Image: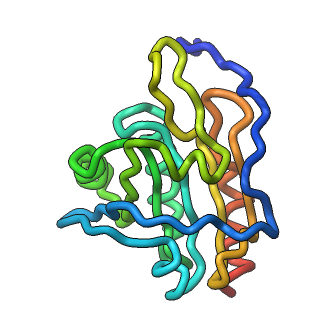
């Protein structure tokens, strides 16, 4: 039995396939350290799968990153996350999940707002985070694939995402 309520999220005007992905610079966290990095610097090295996820420690974030890790999608392109969690929380998530992915820290949720995926949290006045979303971005920062959650909780269609990544890089 499910012990949480599934809720429909309001429509959103998010970045779509064919759009230019908004560039941003935020702390990019890995297992050892973090430093400011930009999306454009990552796409200069190849395609990027940008994964918006809820706060670290939430079951959706854990589930999303376990699935992406187990599918080894980072072997095909750069996979990076974005959430409102701090660099310290990101380091814990990376270590606990044995992840080989880097995570952007965006506590003010500005990146999610720029991508049109910001979501106000019920019962938490003034607190917003990103709804789950994935954007596959090519070296010109053109969005080649976009998926944005329409309900809470919702998870990326992993088979579709994997197929799109392989089609872009193979």
Where residue 4 sits, quadrant-wise, is top right
Q: Is residue 7 depicted above or below 99 in this figure?
A: above
Residue 145 at x, y percent in the picture: 74, 64
Q: Nearer the viewer, residue 48 or 157?
A: 48
View extreme (left): residue: 32
Q: Is residue 11 above or below residue 33?
A: above
Query: Where in the figure is residue 137, as x and y percent of width and height?
Result: 65, 72
Give the quadrant of the C terminus.
Answer: bottom right
Q: How is the image coloured?
A: rainbow
Quadrant containing the N terminus in the rendered view: top right
Left/right of residue 70 with respect to residue 149 in the rendered view = left
In the rendered view, tell whether residue 158 sits above or below residue 48: above
Q: Position of residue 152 (x, y in %)?
A: 63, 27
23 relative to 138 in the view: left or right:
left
Number of numbered discs visible in the structure rendering: 0
Q: Is residue 95 above or below residue 62?
A: below
x and y, in percent, of residue 125 in the image: 46, 16
Q: Residue at x 37, y 71 (%)?
A: 37
Which residue shows up at 65% across the image and 54% down it?
158
Left or right of 67? Residue 94 is left
- Quarter of the rendering containing residue 10: top right
Residue plotted at (77% across, 67% down)? 19
Q: Nearer the viewer, residue 54 or 67?
A: 54
Q: Nearer the viewer, residue 19 or 47?
A: 19
Compared across the picture, whether 53 is left or right of 108 comes to right
């Amino acid at each position: 039995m499910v012990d949480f309520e599934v809720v429909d999220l309001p429509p959103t005007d998010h970045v779509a396939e064919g759009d230019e992905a908004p560039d941003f610079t935020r702390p990019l966290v890995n297992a050892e350290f973090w430093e400011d990095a930009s999306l454009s610097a990552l796409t200069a090295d190849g395609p990027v799968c940008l994964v918006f996820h809820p706060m670290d420690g939430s079951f959706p974030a854990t589930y999303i990153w376990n699935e992406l890790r187990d599918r080894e999608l980072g072997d095909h392109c750069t996979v990076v996350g974005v959430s409102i969690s701090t660099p310290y929380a990101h380091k814990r998530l990376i270590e606990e999940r044995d992840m080989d992915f880097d995570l952007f820290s965006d506590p003010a949720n500005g990146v999610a707002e720029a991508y049109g995926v910001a979501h106000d949290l019920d019962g938490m006045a003034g607190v917003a985070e990103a709804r789950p979303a994935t954007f596959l971005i090519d070296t010109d920062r053109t969005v080649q694939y976009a998926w944005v959650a329409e309900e809470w909780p919702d998870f990326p269609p992993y088979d579709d995402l994997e197929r799109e990544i392989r089609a872009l890089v193979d």
